[in-house]
Structure formats: C-alpha cells, structure tokens
Amino acid sequence: MVLEIIVIFLLGLMPPIISILTRRQTETRVRARLIRAMETATYPSIQRLPPSLNQYDPEEFSLPIGAQTCRFNARSPFIRCAVNPLGPCQGCSHYQRRD
C-alpha cells in the first residue's frame, strides 16, 4: 500500500519536473541567441554600399547579343530582341533600322 502511494506521488511529480527542465533548456538557448544577435548588430562585419541608380548595366558585364542596328534590339547579354527574343536576327520580319 505504501509502495503504491510513493509510485503515484512520483508519477504526479514527473510532469512539473520535466516542464522545469525543458523551460531551463529553452531559456538558455534563447539567451544565447539573443547575445549572438546583439553582438552581430553591434559589430557589423560588412558595410553596405548605397544602391546605385542603375544596378544592372549590361555593357559593364558583357556585350549585348543580336543585331545592334535593329530598333527592337534588347541591348542585353541574355535576350536578343524585344519582339523575337530567341530567334536569329538574319531574315527577321520585324527588323527595323534604328535611327
């Protein structure tokens, strides 16, 4: 009878004990993350440059593809033409000489 009472008492204490241990572990993790975040914010390792007005200048990276004399040339290293992006420039029905 006494043994049963002790077992029931110990089983009743298990949930609060587990809860306390879990809470301590969580608080330790949160505290460590907060300290890390504060250190990162205090000592930035990289200074950011202000964004330029023209962030992508295709002439800076590579030459544009397609016929440079065409009005519809996209002036891009990736797309040939605004009308016919994948097609060849030779014999294109949309070709118009640029002014």
Image: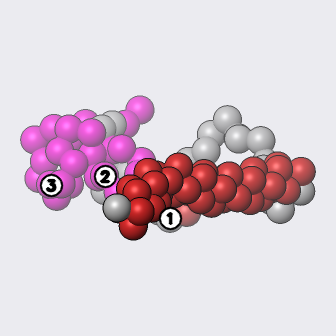
Task: Give residue 54's position: percent from left, percent from top.
Answer: 62, 40
- Mark 1–mark 3 contact, CB under 8 Å? no
Q: Which residues are magenta?
A: 73-99
- Residue linked to disc 3: 87
Check residue 98 for magenta coloring.
yes
The relative height of residue 61 versus residue 69 in the rendered view (above or below) is: below
In terms of depth relative to the viewer, which is nearer, 74 or 42?
42
Q: Amino acid at mark 2?
A: Ile
Q: Is residue 40 toward the left or the right of residue 28 in the image?
A: right
Colour treatment of the image: secondary structure
**Distance Cα–Cα, label 2 vs label 3:** 10 Å
Q: Amino acid at mark 3?
A: Gly
Q: Earlier in the sequence, mark 1 or mark 2?
A: 1
Q: Amino acid at mark 1?
A: Ser
Point 53% across, 49% down: residue: 16
**Distance Cα–Cα, label 1 vs label 2:** 12 Å
Task: Give residue 82's position: percent from left, percent from top.
Answer: 27, 39
- Residue linked to disc 2: 79
Q: Is residue 23 toward the left or the right of residue 73 in the image?
A: right
Point 29% across, 52% down: residue: 80
Name the element at disc 2: loop
- Residue linked to disc 1: 62
